[in-house]
């Protein structure tokens, strides 16, 4: 048992020494703001190879250790308690799936239980729920002809009618490029046994969806956008109470319907916090309590939630009048060559999206007063 402990310590010391040297190389490159020199790259590769061999040997030693009569967890617990009693510092090193516990004389190992990977918080992705037309594979210029309404006139018998012009105009959707690139070193890919690659492949398309949600539901233009703006940007907001009343919001619904929008596809957009607040507010103070929002419905219209609209803002709209199209194809490239000098793989996604507001009157925005 003692022989195994000494062998494990020697392997761990060598492993840590290599890690320290790799850290030194990284510090120098960061401080001087440059890439690794050829000599540093060769040394880095040699240290990485040696650490892989050391790791395999540590795994082998750990297996032999676990076959002994002494329980590894009990051994580690014993060492920690003895060190605390003696006031000796204890170091814990994470090596893939093992935790190495060491002091000046003895060592032990405890297996690490890797739990499910925690995904990022992506609340509020409602782009595909509010009814936005989202055609794909578009090319060329997309425009929507518009015209103003005309009115007939009453004239007497035999009186010649005057000409009534029809005023035409057009609305266009100009696409803009959206992209993201995430480089991952091959050492990271190998050390995580491909898990990091799986995470990156999931995060990249999700990041585009999050940005499109932010563009469409935000009340301010997203940084870098020229034509990619949602219907609430620049829209004059109606002030309502800090806790909006049913009557206030119903008047906003009525104002949109008064423009000629048929209302069959109208819906509300607000934050989850605002929805929770309105779920606890009554429609009125008379009779039986009935909440303003019940089963995600407000004033007879569905409610969707996203934090991108901003706290205190309540949007209303018919999203048929806010088409968003994908021009061309989604280009997702896994490039193992361009960053070969850094021994890294580049994950790159590029898309071109365009959107336009066909009818401004189909949207309304309310802002709750500060309490």
Image (tube, rainbow, N blue to C red):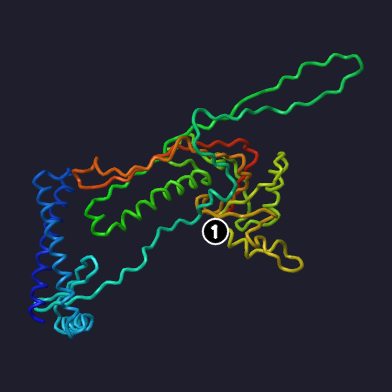
Work out whether 112 lies above or below 83.
above
Q: Quadrant of residue 162?
A: top right
Percent coordinates x, y for residue 81 in the rendering: 20, 83
Q: Which residue is mark 1?
A: 272
Residue 334 in the figure: left or right of residue 96? right
Residue 129 in the figure: left or right of residue 156? left
- Taking the spot 53% from the left edge, 32% from the top edge, the residue there is 173
Element under label 1? helix
Q: Quadrant of residue 272?
A: bottom right
Q: Number of labelled discs? A: 1
Residue 371 in the figure: left or right of residue 158? left
Task: Indicate the quadrant containing the N terminus: top left, top right, bottom left or bottom right.
Answer: bottom left
Residue lying at the far right of the rendered structure = 157
Q: Dot 1, crowdedness within 10 Å: few (<14), some or many (≥20)?
A: some
Percent coordinates x, y for residue 234 in the rendering: 55, 39
Q: Nearer the viewer, residue 350 or 315?
A: 350
Residue 193 in the figure: left or right of residue 366? left
Percent coordinates x, y for residue 49 in the rendering: 13, 56
Work out whether 216 lies above or below 93.
above
- Taking the spot 69% from the left edge, 56% from the top edge, the residue there is 246
Percent coordinates x, y for residue 197 in the rendering: 32, 53
Work out whether 127 lies above or below 277.
above
Q: Nearer the viewer, residue 266 or 310?
A: 266
Task: Indicate the quadrant containing the C terminus: top left, top right, bottom left or bottom right.
Answer: bottom right
Q: Nearer the viewer, residue 250 or 355?
A: 355
């Amino acid at each position: 048992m003692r022989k195994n402990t000494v062998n494990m310590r020697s392997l761990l010391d060598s492993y840590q020494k290599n890690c320290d040297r790799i850290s030194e190389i990284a510090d120098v490159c960061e401080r001087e703001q440059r890439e690794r020199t050829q000599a540093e790259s060769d040394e880095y590769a040699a240290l990485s190879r040696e650490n892989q061999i050391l790791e395999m040997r540590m795994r082998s030693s750990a297996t032999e250790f676990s076959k002994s009569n002494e329980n590894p967890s009990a051994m580690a617990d014993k060492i920690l308690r003895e060190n605390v009693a003696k006031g000796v510092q204890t170091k814990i090193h994470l090596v893939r799936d093992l935790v190495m516990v060491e002091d000046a004389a003895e060592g032990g190992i405890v297996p690490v239980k890797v739990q499910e990977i925690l995904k990022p918080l992506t609340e509020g992705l409602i782009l595909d729920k509010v009814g936005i037309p989202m055609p794909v594979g578009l090319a060329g210029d997309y425009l929507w002809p518009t015209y103003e309404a005309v009115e007939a006139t009453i004239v007497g018998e035999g009186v010649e009618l005057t000409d009534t012009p029809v005023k035409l105009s057009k609305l266009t959707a100009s696409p803009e490029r959206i992209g993201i690139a995430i480089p991952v070193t091959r050492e990271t890919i190998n050390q995580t046994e491909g898990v990091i690659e799986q995470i990156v492949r999931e995060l990249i398309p999700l990041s585009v969806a999050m940005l499109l949600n932010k563009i469409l539901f935000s009340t301010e233009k997203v940084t870098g956008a020229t034509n990619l703006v949602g219907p609430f940007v620049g829209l004059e907001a109606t002030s309502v109470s800090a806790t909006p009343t049913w009557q206030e919001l119903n008047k906003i619904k009525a104002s949109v319907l008064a423009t000629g929008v048929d209302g069959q596809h109208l819906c509300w957009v607000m934050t989850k916090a605002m929805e929770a607040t309105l779920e606890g507010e009554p429609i009125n103070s008379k009779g039986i309590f009935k909440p303003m929002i019940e089963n995600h419905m407000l004033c007879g219209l569905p409610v969707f939630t996203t934090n991108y609209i901003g706290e205190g803002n309540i949007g209303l709209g018919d999203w048929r009048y806010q088409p968003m199209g994908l021009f061309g194809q989604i280009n997702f490239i896994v490039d193992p060559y361009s960053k070969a000098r850094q021994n890294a793989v580049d994950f790159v996604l590029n898309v071109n999206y365009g959107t336009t507001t066909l009818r401004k009157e189909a949207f309304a925005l309310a802002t709750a007063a500060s309490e």
